[in-house]
Image: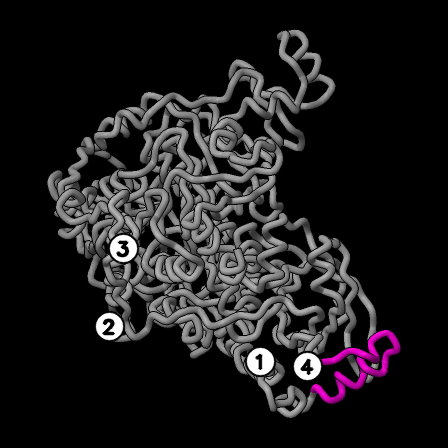
Amino acid sequence: MVKLFDSGVFYVNGEIIRDDAEGLKRLNSLGISADKKEALKKTIAYSVMQAHNTSGNTEQLKIKFDAMASHDITYVGIIQTARASGLKEFPIPYVLTNCHNSLCAVGGTINEDDHMFGLSAAKKYGGIYVPAHLAVIHQYMREMMAGCGKMILGSDSHTRYGALGTMAIGEGGGELAKQLLCKTYDVNRPEVIAIYLTGKPDPAVGPQDIALAIIGAVFKNGYVKNKVMEFIGDGIKNLSAEYRNGIDVMTTETTCLSSIWITDDNTKEWYDIHGRSKDFKVMEPENGAYYDGLVYVDMSKVKPMIAMPFHPSNVYTIDELNENLEDILDIVEKNGAKQIDNSGISFKLKDKIKNGRLMVEQGVIAGCAGGTYDNVVDAADILAGKTIGDGDFTLSVYPSSQPVFMRLVENGAIFKLMEAGATVRSAFCGPCFGAGDVPPNNGLSIRHSTRNFPNREGSKPGNGQIASVALMDARSIAATAVNHGVLTAATDIDLSFTKPKYFFNRSVYDNRVYKGFGKADPSVELKFGPNITDWPKMSALPENLLLKVVSYITDPVTTTDELIPSGETSSYRSNPLGLAEFTLSRKDPAYVGRTKEVQKAETARNTEGQCPKEALPELNDIFAAIKNTEEFKDIHFRTDVGIGTTIYAVKPGDGSAREQAASCQKVIGGWANIAKEYATKRYRSNLINWGMLPFLFEGETPFENSDYIFVPGVREAIAENKKDITAYVVKNGKLNEFTLNMAELTEDERKIILAGCLINYYKEN
């Protein structure tokens, strides 16, 4: 089904040739150069990145994007950051969508206040504003902004339009602010991994099934981490452009940097249907292209899949799950309990086995992954003339955009769904991040959406609630609905698909979307609601740091949802200090109190007439231990040593691009993270952009939670780009030396950290 190659490959006339002795002989016989340095330039990804690279250095890229996109839990902070740094006008098309807080259901007026801020910003700075319920962010970008050979940056991790020939990257807000200020996205040239698709999927197998099969094969081993996935192979011709979009959007869950696909007549048809034929061109690798690895996917062998709680990589075939129900659910329960071990509640799934079958309470087909036209019409055909029943099971469907919704109404698909008992909603991302269709306590929801982390369905483990999500394709969700909640693979029922043709009607966009790019009006006043606040003042990196470890997380992976929860907290993302109150609240509820206690000492250090040791008496022993060391006897704590906090996590940052995972730590006293590795580039970038040190430490840590770590000369170490930085655990009156590591930082990244954050850096420049 899915096979990973243990070497690089050359791609010659559609043939895969391994980078080994036998392969080199084959290249020679074909008259193809084996020069990998030149051959890697023949990938699609290389050509697109170099077309946008302004550095003049093919290895150290400085990219300027063609367009950007943000939604309503990120654009306020991004614009506020850029505005504080001197923003005058959006230099490239910047789309502001309203698909996350569009229900305006939490916190009084604050969500709609954000929307009014967004519209006023689009008018003032020359942006594109998509009102609530018209489209989820990625569907609008596909329909209106993607283009073959383009690059798009988005402040949402699922910014992926590779199936339409567009290299798209999801990053934290700081990277978008840089583009607004005419700066660049700096990254070393990423490796490119070929995803070779062959065969034709079974009609009952959908794009989510193919995607989950790939994710299950590559996530845990990091095979494509921070690399570009380039889709090639003779099977691509068997997939519609919409089907490809459904696979492509899920590439984020592999932790890759971006994706790109070959384009063909199916891609051209998609652009033609959307009235944008000029944005199509044929894209394919040059003959003899070299890839740093290859994932071989025989789509004809992929069966309906399910990703069990609590990660998209926790993958089984539905057949396998049904055949080994007790054993697999026992494994899932035990692993799940470890992820919610601080909640004091019991996570159970085996109690859902009824008469030897798994019963689920809810199905959801939604958003940029599930709510696309092909998924919904196929689900409607499965449910046509049937019923989801009057029991516990419910089904809701969210078309991905108003144009998609309109066509589904025209061709009768919506009627089929509603007649069967499904409810149909407007375009909304809520079910994907925990702000819509929250299942009951102990409930299990099956969803064609993008993620199934803890709390992504909206429950609150910290409050004694627990529910969970399993990811599935729309077709198998519909099959399960036909069986009234009994888990069922779409291959297990009779299928007949009508495949009605799609016609794109852009009239709703013409009538409602504010298209202001190139028409900035400085006279427009920004509209501020009471929840929209400026970023608090942040200090430059001090000469030395004293860090208290205030959270110590040993999970194999820590998601951004655990660092800053999604769901209703999203409504407070325009208020940095207000949102920070939720930091780590699902994972370590005591974190906020601990770090704010330490922050009192730093505030006192910077306030005339106050004493850090009086603000935090435990510092008396810590300061004494440092001063009693000959090397540091002359240190002056008020002027020379910044006092802050750090967290330790094995592998933090998987999941969302949201910058608040880092900024929330910073505004309440955080100065650093310490990790064995960082799950994604985007989380590490977020730390840097908020002036936080992304330390690395391999092996058993010499410190524990609540220990103090003294890092002398840290400012000098960053300025001089040192990789090894001496630190000390201060404990029991002694200093125990160890070494923290710092992976490569660009010159700008070092300057940002030294300045204290991105805002400070741009103010200085």
Q: How is the image coloured?
A: one colour
Q: CA distance from mark 4 to mark 2?
A: 43 Å
The residue that mark 2 highlights is: 109
Where residue 678 sits in the image (x, y, percent)?
61, 55
Instruction: Kindly tell me whether residue 696 is visible in this rendering.
Output: yes
Part of the protein shown in magenta:
619-638
Secondary structure of the residue carrying tag 1 is: helix
Q: Which of the two marks, 2 or 1, is nearer to us in this view? A: 1
The residue that mark 3 highlights is: 522
Taking depth in this image into account, of 154 and 600 the one nearest to the observer is 600
Q: CA distance from mark 4 to mark 3?
A: 43 Å
The residue that mark 1 highlights is: 599
Q: With respect to residue 323, does 712 lie above or below?
A: below
Q: Earlier in the sequence, mark 1 or mark 4?
A: 1
The residue that mark 4 highlights is: 638
Label 2–label 3 contact, CB within 8 A: no
Q: Earlier in the sequence, mark 3 or mark 1?
A: 3
Secondary structure of the residue carrying tag 3 is: loop
Q: CA distance from mark 1 to mark 4?
A: 14 Å
Q: With respect to residue 674, does 706 lie above or below?
A: below
Indicate the amino acid at tag 4.
Answer: Arg
Q: Earlier in the sequence, mark 4 or mark 2?
A: 2
